Image (cartoon, helix red, strand yellow):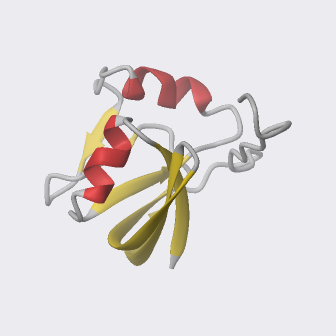
Amino acid sequence: MITLALRHGRGAAEGVLARKPFTLSVLPEDGIRLAKPFFAGDHAGVVSMLDGQGTLKGAHAWLRCEYERHISSGDHHVVLANVLEGSLFPRQGSKPLVHLRKDGFRY
């Protein structure tokens, strides 16, 4: 299982809360540059998989997930999902991206 915090009103939150299977890309530590165009609607960096799902080019790994339940907390949904499958894309000398907020008031 995995937990996600998704901001209310974001397209990603709407898709996950629709209770359809979804794919998460595990990005390298410099991978925010991969995610920004995707969330702005540019899907040129997406590699399609056999079932129509996709992962971002340059990702460390992908996880196929299925919605289990969620709670709303402040301006975010906290989602619990089952991991159905996944795969690694080995990248030497790179660590996965970890996003930590300095405080609860800004990103």
Q: Most extreme residue toward the left, as rendered?
A: 51
Choose top left, top right, bottom left or bottom right for residue 17.
bottom left
Rendered position, 1 above or below 75: below
Choose top left, top right, bottom left or bottom right for residue 63.
bottom left
Quadrant (top left, top right, bottom left, bottom right) of the C terminus: top right
Residue 94 on image: x %, y %: 73, 45
Q: Most extreme residue toward the right, as rendered?
A: 102
Judge from the rendering whether residue 18 lies leftward or rightward of residue 39; answer left or right. left
Q: Residue at x 38, y 28 (%)?
A: 38
Observer-nearest residue: 46 or 81?
81
Observer-nearest residue: 45 or 99?
99
Residue 43 on image: x %, y %: 28, 27
Judge from the rendering whether residue 82 lies leftward or rightward of residue 66; answer left or right. right
Residue 37 on image: x %, y %: 42, 20
Judge from the rendering whether residue 7 lies leftward or rightward of residue 94; answer left or right. left
Observer-nearest residue: 53 or 74?
74
Observer-nearest residue: 53 or 5?
5
Residue 40 on image: x %, y %: 38, 20
Rendered position, 90 above or below 31: below
Q: Residue at x 68, y 31 (%)?
A: 30
Q: Residue at x 15, y 58 (%)?
A: 50
Count the numbered circles shown: 0
Judge from the rendering whether residue 31 lies leftward or rightward of residue 18; answer left or right. right
